Amino acid sequence: MKITLISFDYFDFDANIIKELQSRGIEAHHIDISKYYYRYASFGEKMSNFFSKVFLGKNIKREKTEEFILHHLNQYGHQDIILTIRPDRISKKAHLKIKQSCNKYLTYIYDSTNRFPINHLVDLFDKIYTFDQNDAKKFGFELISNYIYLNKKELNPNKVYRNDLFIISSIDERLGLMNKVADYCSIHNISFKFIVVGKKRPQNINSNIEFTTENIFLNDLLEELEESKIFLDLIRKNQNGLSFRIFEALAYQKKIITSNQSIKDYDFYSPNNVFILDENNPIIPKEFFESNYEPLSDEIYNKYTIKAWVDRVFELKN
């Protein structure tokens, strides 16, 4: 079987899909657009692209990116399945060409279509998977969560952690709630490491919130996850799909504090392991930090592994 994944894998989550497929002897390729960098030939070409986008709806940079995709597909030959993640980043014209290169064309959306609409593309795919409950209900997409990509860690209830609470986030609408939680932690002597990533440090935020202009990639993140007792997960407006931070918590067998109300709909939810934050009054009970994590049954845990995800999306038999 031949499978190709096309994605913008900025944080190296999607590469785990390829590793899982290849571990089964499947010929799997990853066209990772985040690693493609188009260099303008001159400042004049850059300005020309700007005016083409604004006035003609033509994007030279995107066209070159799509040429990059099609070039690699031509090298790989006809595929049994192609899976695209973030299909909104690719033009319909290019999608039609990609579809000609496979027997089955799939897409997975791990963000809300409110943020990244795909209405103009839905007729292209043989199946559309989404992590968003609202999109699944509204459009008839197939609901599937993100996945556990890490090996399961051993429980260590006696470990002394560097931080009680950890989060990393871009600078966006979630910052206000993060700042409230940071202030709460500061007052109640809860150690925390909160990192925000952006171009400029925000003003009027808790002085203990760390700021960086550099993206922090997965391998660099693992140490912070290891050294934190509980993870904090804050969602954007209108999001109800579960972020990868939830599944990292499952792998590490650690508790999570989240603003995502929809987590109650999943069978791994337990008030002992998951605390749902009130955005207007972010008070975290002391007992939540003091009680131990309650392990999941193997039956429930295994449903959320990347193995189970790959089996379902690509309809592979065990």
Image (cartoon, grey):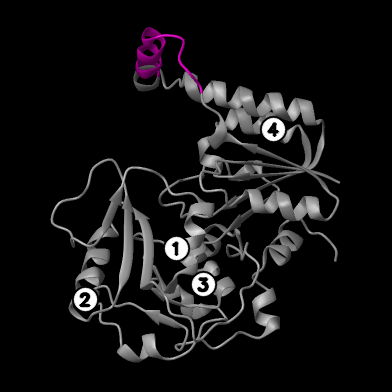
Residue type at tag 2: Tyr
| Looking at the image, residue 41 lies above or below residue 270 | above
- Residue 178: x, y in percent? 27, 65
| Gap between marks 2 and 4 measured at Cα | 50 Å
Magenta region includes residue 127: no
Q: According to the image, label 3 marks what residue? A: 249
- Residue 96: x, y in percent? 66, 31
| Gap between marks 4 and 3 measured at Cα | 36 Å
* Residue located at (51% from left, 72% from top): 249
Q: Nearer the viewer, residue 214 or 176?
A: 214
Residue type at tag 4: Ile
Q: According to the image, label 4 marks what residue? A: 98
Q: Under tag 4, what secondary structure?
A: helix
| Gap between marks 2 and 1 measured at Cα | 21 Å
Q: Under tag 2, what secondary structure?
A: helix
Classified by dominant secondary structure, the portion drawn in magenta counts as: helix
Could you tell me if the residues under marks 4 and 1 are in contact, i.e. CB atoms within 8 Å? no
Q: According to the image, label 2 marks what residue? A: 184
- Residue 111: x, y in percent? 48, 54
Q: According to the image, label 1 marks what residue? A: 224
Report the disc number at residue 81. Answer: none
- First in sequence, mark 4 or 1: give its number: 4
> In front of the other: label 1 or label 3?
1
Quarter of the picture holding the C terminus: bottom right
- First in sequence, mark 1 or 3: give its number: 1
| Gap between marks 1 and 3 measured at Cα | 12 Å
Q: Under tag 1, what secondary structure?
A: helix
- First in sequence, mark 3 or 2: give its number: 2
Residue type at tag 1: Glu
- First in sequence, mark 4 or 3: give its number: 4
